Image (cartoon, rainbow, N blue to C red):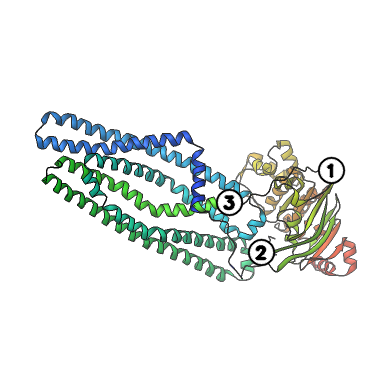
């Protein structure tokens, strides 16, 4: 059983802790690091975008010259001007396409870098941190938030191109007449007031929407992972209401953000109308006074009209930029979690004993699940851990396996060179000392060979077949259509076969200490004997801690520890505990009657 469903109490006194969320400066720093890793592409993208902007600005200027030529009756100038205008259209279209492609390629590479970085950091987060924050928060960051940011990459490319066009167009305005350029600037106070009303509210609203989505994901994951418990206690209605409440909070946050965006969009339309009116009125006044030509006013009006799209893109994108920024802050926040400290290498030598001294552990302050356990497992022997559901068995197994550190006490590993605390081992080395298989195992999508060698990538086919045969899976693996090359996935194998593959992985890794946390509990009656034999093959010749769901498996161990209320209340061999007539004897009698 998992700690989430057995040992760990529900959070009722406070909201669950969350991973850090990056500030704007930290988010930009993370994005800048990703950009700096592609310097050549950054320079090429910038150059192509500037050239494309020049092409966009050139066409209105040529059209303005064409209007003046028509008004002046200069027929000789019409053909060259028409040719230049056509060339400008083609030139702008070609380089705009090239710039868009280059920007999207750069954005895709940056997004891929961020995706890989956040996934690597997420996989390296310590188990105690994951226990504290819950699975919903980290799952939403490496899935929904990453996808939201990746989806914004094409928009980012468009915004960058539009921003560059605006800058180049501003220079084009100045080249026509400074007074027409000044008339164009009347749009900026409207934009500024709109942004001032929009931005301070948009960021928190979109952050609230992402938090609500993460909470909804947490509730859904808990409901799905704890499906057995939900059914056992007839909690389907309660969990459905929790999901509905979380969904309602998410929808409410999204609607609030949408209302604010609609207000912003209407103010932008008003600014465009005001700007075009100002340019035309100023142009009329200047033409009437002979200061500028009709062609120059035409060029200015066309320039402003050409700016509708890039200005609209930049301003309307603030909605999606806020969303992407909120997602980026949560993505970069994962990278802010301190990695586990690096420690010196300490390879094991020979057989290893496990000694637990004063082990305590709590998931919530004031509620200890393990309350001061002292136990020793001599090298090469096995210890079964039994007890009622919620007694602390899974938590004790997790602490002894180094999955998460104890709140107090220590777990020592003793080999021929001396003893070492599990907490003093480098995280990358812990699995060289201790291997663990829990009740909840996973089959990765891919070939069966890839799935088995996941724990030991350098294994040969002969080693894989030997490990598969040792856990009793050789016959059915050989019967598969493509043998080890058969494609498998999370839902293609029975529970018993999934556990056999997990035990085969452990054999390939070959650690001196194994912890089996109810690794045979998922099998039905037909597969129980096969899994017990597979577990026995893994335990043989190793130091083993076995959280036993089936007492026949406990009986096969050298000693048995009975855990109740976070304490070891009985310890001895099977015969000793049966003769004692205590808790284990009662469990054995009940098991024997079954």
**Mark number displayed over residue 175:** none
Q: Quick one: quadrant of the C terminus? A: bottom right
Q: Earlier in the sequence, mark 2 or mark 3?
A: 2
Density class for disc 3 (Cα within 10 Å; few <14, some 14-19, many ≥20) is some
What is the x, y in percent for residue 22? 53, 53
Q: Quadrant of residue 384?
A: bottom right
Closer mark to the observer between disc 1 and disc 2: 1
Q: Position of residue 307 (x, y in %)?
A: 28, 46
Which of pointers 1 and 3 indicates the residue nearer the eye? 3
Residue linked to disc 1: 350
The relative height of residue 159 versus residue 54 in the rendered view (above or below) is below
Q: Earlier in the sequence, mark 1 or mark 2?
A: 2
Residue corresponding to mark 3: 336
What kind of element bears circle 1? loop
Q: Where, by quadrant of the figure, is residue 581 drawn?
A: bottom right
Alpha-carbon neighbours of circle 2 within 10 Å: few (<14), some, or many (≥20)?
some
Query: Is 56 situated left or right of 154 in this image?
Result: left
From the viewer's perspective, is the residue at label 2 or at label 3 nearer?
3
Residue 423 percent location from the top left of the image: 74, 52
Q: Report the disc number at residue 5.
A: 2
- Compared with 409, 100 (above or below) is above
Badge 1 or badge 3: first in the primary sequence: 3
For disc 1, the neighbor class at 10 Å (few under 14, some 14 to 19, many from 20) is few
Residue at 31% over, 40% down: 168
Apparent side of residue 57 relative to residue 295 in the rendered image (left or right): right
């Amino acid at each position: 059983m998992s700690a989430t469903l057995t040992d760990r109490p529900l959070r009722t006194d406070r909201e669950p802790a969350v991973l850090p969320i990056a500030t704007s400066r930290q988010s930009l720093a993370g994005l800048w690091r990703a950009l700096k890793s592609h310097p050549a592409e950054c320079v090429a993208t910038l150059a192509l975008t500037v050239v494309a902007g020049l092409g966009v600005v050139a066409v209105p200027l040529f059209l303005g010259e064409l209007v003046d030529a028509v008004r002046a009756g200069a027929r000789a100038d019409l053909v060259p001007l028409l040719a230049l205008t056509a060339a400008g259209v083609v030139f702008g279209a070609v380089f705009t396409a090239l710039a868009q492609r280059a920007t999207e390629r750069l954005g895709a590479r940056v997004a891929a870098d961020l995706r890989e970085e956040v996934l690597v950091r997420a996989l390296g987060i310590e188990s105690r941190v994951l226990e504290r924050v819950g699975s919903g928060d980290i799952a939403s960051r490496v899935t929904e938030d990453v996808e939201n940011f990746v989806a914004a990459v094409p928009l980012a490319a468009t915004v960058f191109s539009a921003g560059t066009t605006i800058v180049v167009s501003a220079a084009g305005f100045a080249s026509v007449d400074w007074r027409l350029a000044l008339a164009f600037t009347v749009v900026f106070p409207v934009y500024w007031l709109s942004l001032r009303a929009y931005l301070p509210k948009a960021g928190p609203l979109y952050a609230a929407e992402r938090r609500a989505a993460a909470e909804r994901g947490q509730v859904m994951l808990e409901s799905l992972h704890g499906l057995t418990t939900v059914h056992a206690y007839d909690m389907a209605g309660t969990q459905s209401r929790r999901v509905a409440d979380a969904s309602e909070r998410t929808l409410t946050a999204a609607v609030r953000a949408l209302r604010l965006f609609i207000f912003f969009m209407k103010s932008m339309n008003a600014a465009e109308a005001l700007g075009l009116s100002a340019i035309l009125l100023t142009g009329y006044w200047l033409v009437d006074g002979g200061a500028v030509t009709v062609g120059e006013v035409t060029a200015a009006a066309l320039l402003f009209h050409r700016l509708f799209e890039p200005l609209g893109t930049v301003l309307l994108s603030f909605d999606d930029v806020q969303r992407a920024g909120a997602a980026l802050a949560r993505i970069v926040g994962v990278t802010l979690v301190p990695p586990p400290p690096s420690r010196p290498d300490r390879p094991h030598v020979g057989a290893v004993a496990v000694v637990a001294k004063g082990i305590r552990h709590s998931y919530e302050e004031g509620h200890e699940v393990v309350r001061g356990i002292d136990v020793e497992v001599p090298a090469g022997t096995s210890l079964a851990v039994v007890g009622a559901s919620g007694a602390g068995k899974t938590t004790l197994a997790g602490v002894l396996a180094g999955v998460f550190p104890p709140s107090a006490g220590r777990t020592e590993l003793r080999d021929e060179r001396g003893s070492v605390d599990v907490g003093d081992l480098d995280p990358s080395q812990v699995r060289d000392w201790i291997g663990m298989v829990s009740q909840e195992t996973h089959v990765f999508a891919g070939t069966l060979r890839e799935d088995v060698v996941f724990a030991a990538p350098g294994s040969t086919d002969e080693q894989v077949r030997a490990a598969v045969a040792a856990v009793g899976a050789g016959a059915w693996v050989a019967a598969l259509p493509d043998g080890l090359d058969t494609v498998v996935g999370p839902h293609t194998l029975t529970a018993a076969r999934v556990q056999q593959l997990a035990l085969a992985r452990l054999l390939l890794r070959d650690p001196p200490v194994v912890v089996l946390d109810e690794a045979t509990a998922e099998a039905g009656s037909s597969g129980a004997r096969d899994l017990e034999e597979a577990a026995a093959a893994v335990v043989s010749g190793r130091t083993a801690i076995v959280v036993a769901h089936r007492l026949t498996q406990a009986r096969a161990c050298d000693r048995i520890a009975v855990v109740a209320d976070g304490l070891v209340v009985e310890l001895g061999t099977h015969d000793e505990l049966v003769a004692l007539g205590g808790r284990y004897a009662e469990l054995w009698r009940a098991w024997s009657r079954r």
